[in-house]
Image (cartoon, rainbow, N blue to C red):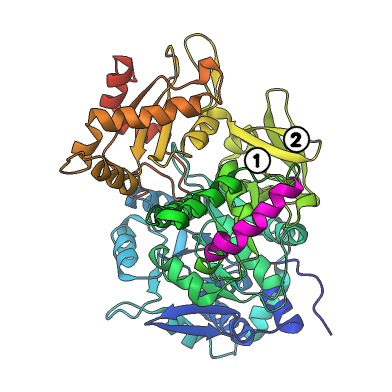
Amino acid sequence: MTLKQPTRLFDFPRYQLQNSPLPDALTTKYDGKWNKVSTQQYVEWSEQISRALVEMGVQRDEKIALISSTNRYEWNIMDMGILQAGAVNVPVYPTISSEDYNYIFNDAEVTYCFVSDRELYDKVIAIKDKVPTLKEIFIFNEEKGIRNWREVLEIGKDNKNQPELERRMEAVKNEDLATLIYTSGTTGKPKGVMLSHNNLVSNVIDSGPRVPVFQGAKALSFLPVCHVFERMLTYLYIYNGIPIYFAESIDKIGDNIREVQPEIFAAVPRLLEKVYDKIIAKGNELSGIKRGLFFWAVSLGEKFDPETNSGLYNFKLGIARKLIFSKWQEALGGKVEAIVSGGAALNPKLNAVFSAAGFNVQEGYGLTETSPVIAVNGPDWDMKKIGTVGEPIRNVEVKIAEDGEVLCKGPNVMMGYYKQTEKTAEVLDNDGWFHTGDIGEVVDGRYLKITDRKKEMFKTSGGKYVAPQIIENKMKESRFIEQIMVIGEGEKHPAAIIQPDFEFLKSWATHKGIKFSDEKDLVSKTEVHDRIMEDVEQKNQSFGHSEQIKKIALCADLWSVDAGHLTPKLSLKRRNIMSLYKDEYEQIFGHSPSR
């Protein structure tokens, strides 16, 4: 007898247990060895956690925080354990400030917290006295003097309160609050997005037809599971009986991919850009005919378009795949069948090159508030179009408002913002339409295309609208540009603050005989400024005169989450960047940005 269709998140492991039990449902690498948790263990340990939480006095709707520096099976087991006890999982980004930790813990009234390592423990213990509801902090790693999560597992071995747990589980309905996810927003305090079991379960099931499912496939998970994109995908893998292997760290993704040889993984565009940059760097090390063939294949890939590819093009592509692109496949484990891209806009040219190389890149779109998927490209070309985020998924409606804003309606739309009814009313109208804040259009009557964030568009002094994300995406096609922010609101023309790709720039400067001592010295060189401006002017040709970047300023810093340039999703923190580079702004426009 098989379990009926899941309606609550903790139904997914049980569904897998009855339909496709795995010896390696969840696998994490510790001390050089992959540690596997079977589906059976996953279900049993989750129940132990639930029984322990009940024994510890955790009540229905109580908030429990999970914080981990890397994805690992303990997080997933805790997730299910919390939900089965009728409590609410509050996943927290590990990299946010102590001030944000303090705000989130107090806003959610967190009672227990589970962290992965000593660094995060110290971060939470520093605010513990400021959070009156916080009773205890547990850690996943073994650390002397700190309570370990296995103590909780041990408490749950006693099954005397199993009847109470079963009553709790039975009482959880699909419309009940499951998780409280605080958005990392670029401005202001984080908002707690309330997602029900049904929000996430429906998104998993309705996204399912878009993601290819392979017999015997493995998934590699490395995007932060505290973010709803990776979290929803882990539920999707569980639902489809796909083993999940958790990468050790961002730095070791390449090694882990070659070791695990996954068929599917999710990525943000920035990561795909870095993979591409490394491939191109390898190509630059070649010489003679090998170098010529490499860049011939890349140039061919950039022109890839299944709607217009000719027979001659496909013949050439077959040669390129055999001689060049097959090596790209090997570098990513040799078995990749699907790369799900989300979190930000993917450069169409990058998508074309990866598609030409034989990778099935499926770009999608959504927000935390929509659990997250609104639309996603399918695995086959009759369900996919480069430059778009695909068609809306099943049971989700999309319409474009008069001002171009994308509106969404469906079972995936959040319950609201926690304790913020006014902010909820700003984005969720009386007819149930969620206002995404993104500007978009429908292409070919089917595919959704996102062009920019509504709040990020600005007007020049001449009254012309500028959509910065489109321009930034185009400019990042330059090998010289790692990060870029277009500026110019209320000014005569757009300009840009640029963080160069220092690895490539240093190689170029050395080749040109330009001497420099460090990054600051390098970006001050006139030759460097002029060469990057040359690329900018070339890419300006894709835009109207009023949208073209007229001036640039180069910065010597590496933009990062920790330094405040980027959100954990790697989106630009525009207000922060503007504040950090007031001098550069003044250098461009002759006055400070706050005139």
Question: Label 1 is placed on what type of residue?
Answer: Gly
Question: Picture quarter containing residue 229?
Answer: bottom right
Question: Label 2 is placed on what type of residue?
Answer: Val
The residue identified by callout 2 is 443
- Give left or right: position of 559 versus 545: left
**Where residue 205 sits: x, y (%)?**
75, 62
Q: Which mark is residue 94?
A: none
Marks 2/1 in contact by CB < 8 Å: the verdict is yes
Q: Please, what secondary structure does the residue beneath circle 2 have?
A: strand
Q: Nearer the viewer, residue 443 or 118?
A: 443
Q: Please, what secondary structure does the residue beneath circle 1 have?
A: loop
Q: Nearer the viewer, residue 516 or 365?
A: 516
Residue at x 66%, y 52% (from the top left corner): 316
Total tally of numbered discs in the picture: 2
Q: Which mark is residue 387?
A: 1
- Whether residue 346 is visible, yes or no, is no
* Structural crowding at the residue carrying mark 2, measured as other residues with C-alpha within 10 Å and reported as few (<14), some (14–19) or many (≥20): some
Among all residues in the image, which is located at the extreme left? 517
**Where residue 363 sits: x, y (%)?**
64, 50
Q: In the image, is residue 326 part of the stretch drawn in magenta?
A: yes
Magenta: predominant secondary structure element? helix
Residue at x 56%, y 42% (from the top left corner): 347
From the image, which quarter does the N terminus lie in? bottom right
Q: In the image, is residue 279 part of the stretch drawn in magenta?
A: no
The region drawn magenta spans 310-328
- Give left or right: position of 452 versus 443: left
Q: Is residue 106 above or below residue 303?
A: below
Among all residues in the image, which is located at the extreme right? 1
Q: Nearer the viewer, residue 110 or 369?
A: 369
Residue at x 66%, y 72% (from the top left corner): 238
